[in-house]
């Protein structure tokens, strides 16, 4: 395959295969069209307004999800007016910014504690704004959320009694099921999680609520979640670019983003060093793999370097090699720009506007 585009890019660099991304976006668009579930892509992965607008226009989405107020601000500034912060907004200054955004744009967030609900209410009352919230339910990930059933009902009643905070739906995220290799087991457990959400919704409605909005799920489990009673919306994010972890469990999405690196040293007959290390590719969730070159073995990864060994590949100094990140989300966050390859040709770079907006 012609990879002359590599010579246009100095390394280490983040590279987007535009056609692969578009294919992923279209695959998800077809799924949501066929099943009727709403799509709210989680933009903490792509972090680029241009990608958000592509998914809203051509990818079947009705709104977007983000993780932080700083991300919500970037996407709101780009004209998107239906945003869910699928996370808690706790810090007093963050709450003030959330309230300010809500004067002009719908930005919901998820809640799971009385203290947070009171803090949101205080600032919303001051600004004369009503904040819409989703009650987050713990589906077993154990990171956030109130327990399903009675504890959720109690907190829902607390929200009902709190001024300027309005409960509009439930959220749950079964991220602990993402790495599960056994598909049947992943499906069964996802359905169990969705059942907790739906039963909680029914319990709330038996107690005078009128909830018909459940937002949930990610790129490895959405296909099971979308089939379950009560689920109205899915929030996958990684599917847009995929990565080594997602590809292992859900290969219908192509790898669309890689880190391009250059061989900068030859340290032995078969040993070489790349110019990309842990500052160029996030390794907290595992090491990257080398794209399309099975005859290279990884040796050691340092800050600025990765040592590799050839087990039959012809390598030379100056050669450019693509690495597939284990986890794309924190890797994207390392770069200001992504280089776009369209139809195998270099077509310039896009700014990653929400890069570093984790506050
Ligand atoms: C609350 C929430 N929803 C959705 C997602 C998207 O999941 P995925 O990246 O597997 O698509 C995440 C990812 O961390 C998340 O935290």
Image (cartoon, helix red, strand yellow):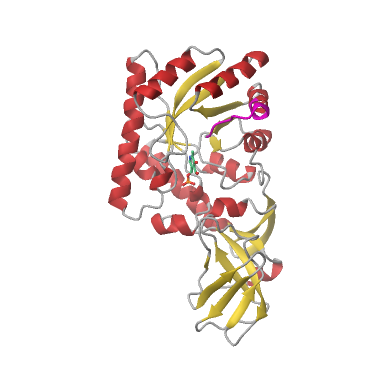
Residue 154 image offset from top left, x and y in percent? 40, 19
Q: Residue at x 28, y 44 (%)?
A: 188
Residue at image point 53% right, 43% down: 58
Residue 168, x across and y down, in percent: 47, 22
Q: Is residue 163 above or below residue 267?
A: above
Location of the C terminus (image quadrant): top right
State the image quarter where residue 299 is shown: bottom right
How many numbered marks are there?
0
Note whether 21 is above or below 295 in the view shown.
above
Residue 183 shown left or right of residue 162 in the figure = left
**Residue 93 is covered by the magenta coloring:** yes
Across and down, in percent, residue 71 comes to 63, 38
The quadrant holding residue 317 is: bottom right
In the rendering, at what x and y percent does residue 90 appear? Answer: 59, 29
Q: Is residue 209 above or below residue 110?
A: above
Name the quadrant containing residue 14: bottom right
Q: Nearer the viewer, residue 211 or 158?
A: 158
Q: Residue at x 56, y 18 (%)?
A: 118
- The magenta stretch is 87-95
Q: Is residue 291 left or right of residue 268?
A: left
């Amino acid at each position: 395959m012609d990879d002359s585009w590599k010579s246009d890019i100095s390394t280490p660099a983040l590279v987007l295969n535009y056609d692969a991304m578009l294919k992923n976006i279209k695959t998800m668009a077809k799924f949501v069209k066929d099943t009727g579930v709403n799509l709210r892509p989680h933009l903490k992965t792509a972090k680029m307004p241009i990608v958000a607008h592509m998914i809203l226009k051509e990818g079947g989405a009705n709104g977007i999800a983000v993780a932080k107020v700083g991300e919500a601000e970037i996407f709101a500034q780009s004209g998107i007016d239906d945003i869910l912060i699928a996370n808690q907004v706790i810090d007093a200054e963050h709450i003030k910014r959330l309230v300010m955004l809500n004067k002009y744009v719908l930005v919901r967030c998820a809640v799971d504690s009385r203290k947070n609900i009171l803090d949101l209410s205080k600032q919303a009352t001051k600004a004369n704004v009503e904040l819409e919230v989703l009650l987050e339910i713990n589906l077993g990930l154990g990171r956030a959320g109130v327990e399903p059933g009675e504890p959720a009902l109690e907190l829902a009643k607390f929200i009902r009694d709190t001024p300027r905070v309005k409960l509009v739906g439930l959220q749950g995220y079964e991220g602990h099921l993402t790495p599960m290799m056994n598909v049947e087991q992943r499906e069964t457990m996802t359905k169990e999680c969705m059942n907790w959400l739906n039963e909680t919704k029914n319990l709330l409605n038996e107690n005078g609520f009128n909830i018909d909005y459940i937002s949930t799920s990610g790129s490895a489990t959405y296909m099971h979640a979308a089939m379950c009673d009560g689920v109205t919306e899915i929030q996958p994010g990684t599917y847009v670019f995929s990565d080594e972890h997602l590809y292992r469990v859900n290969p219908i999405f192509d790898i669309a983003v890689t880190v391009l690196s250059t061989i900068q040293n030859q340290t032995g007959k078969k040993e070489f060093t790349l110019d990309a290390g842990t500052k160029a590719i996030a390794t907290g969730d595992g090491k990257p793999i080398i794209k399309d070159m099975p005859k290279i073995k990884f040796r050691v990864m340092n800050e600025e370097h990765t040592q590799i060994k050839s087990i039959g590949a012809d390598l030379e100094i100056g050669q450019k090699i693509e690495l597939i990140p284990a986890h794309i989300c924190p890797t994207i966050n390392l770069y200001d720009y992504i280089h776009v390859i369209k139809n195998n040709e270099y077509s310039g770079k896009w700014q990653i506007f929400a890069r570093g907006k984790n506050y």
